[in-house]
Image: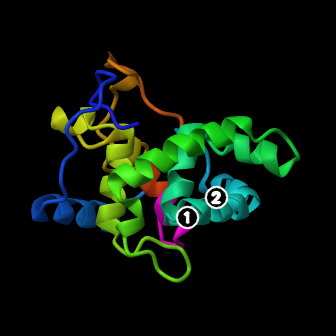
Amino acid sequence: MGTNGTGKLGPRPRLQPARRAYYERAYDEMYVHLGRAGSLSGLKRVWGKVEGLYRVRAEKLGAPWDVIGALAYRESGWKTAMCLSDGGSALEEDAWLADAELEVKDHRVDRLAVTSVGFAADVPAALNCMENWNGTGDYLHGRPSSYLWDNTNWWPGPGRWVADGKWCATAFSQQFGAAVVFKMIRGGAL
């Protein structure tokens, strides 16, 4: 759940007007740096296989499926869902979703004004929720969130939390940021 890099729940930034404007601008101007995190076409292909699972699970949580899908990618790379789609065990996925349900209740994800097709209507609120889900360590250190912006033009560069309370100045992610996945799920141009 959302930590501030110490492994303890930290302060969660409220979505003030300046923060809302930052999310809107970053989301609109975001583009992907290809090469470090694989291909968008590969990501889309995998999403096509697991989308239905996350739609059902998000409905059970009463949460936007685009938010749940993006969080699940960052947390598991959709590996568990791929296993489920091939008839594998749901234990790991159920454990992740139990945590997600607590976080959904805590962050009021269900108040993101979910549209009739399951999308979060309020993009800045969804991005804020995803950043809070992961933790505010980057935010508290004046850096854009690696969790949201990895491998985009908003990526803060090398350096990331590799575990609760453990910072590595040279680490970078092999995954796309949650904002990339969120926008891809919504059918946005990247």
Query: Quick check: marks 2 and 1 in contact, CB under 8 Å?
Result: yes
> Given the current orientation, which residue lies at the most extreme right position?
87
Residue occupying image coordinates x 53% and y 74%: 118
Q: Nearer the viewer, residue 172 or 124?
A: 124
Helix, strand or loop under label 2: helix
Rendered residue at 45%/50% (across/down): 178
Q: Residues within 10 Å of mark 1 (few under 14, many from 20)?
A: many
Category of crowding for the residue at label 2, using alpha-carbon neighbours closer than 10 angstroms: few (below 14), some (14–19), many (at least 20)? some
Give the residue drawn at x 17%, y 65%: 21
Q: Is residue 189 above or below residue 31?
A: below
Q: Nearer the viewer, residue 156 or 19?
A: 19
Q: Which residue is mark 1?
A: 65
Q: Position of residue 125 (x, y in %)?
A: 30, 63
Please tell me whether residue 158 is drawn above or below residue 77 in the rendered image. Answer: above
Q: Which mark is residue 185?
A: none
Amino acid type for the residue under numbered disc 2: Arg
Please indicate whether residue 54 sits to the left or right of residue 190 in the image. right
Residue 187: within the magenta? yes
- Distance from Cα at disc 2 to Cα at disc 1: 8 Å
Q: Tell me which label, 2 or 1, sits earlier in the chain.
A: 2
Tell me where residue 131 appears, x and y as whole percent: 33, 47
Query: Range of the magenta residues?
Result: 182-190
Q: Position of residue 183 (x, y in %)?
A: 47, 64
Point out the residue furthest to the bottom here. Answer: 116
Circle 1: residue type: Trp
Residue 176 visible, this orientation: no
Residue 93 shows in this picture:
yes
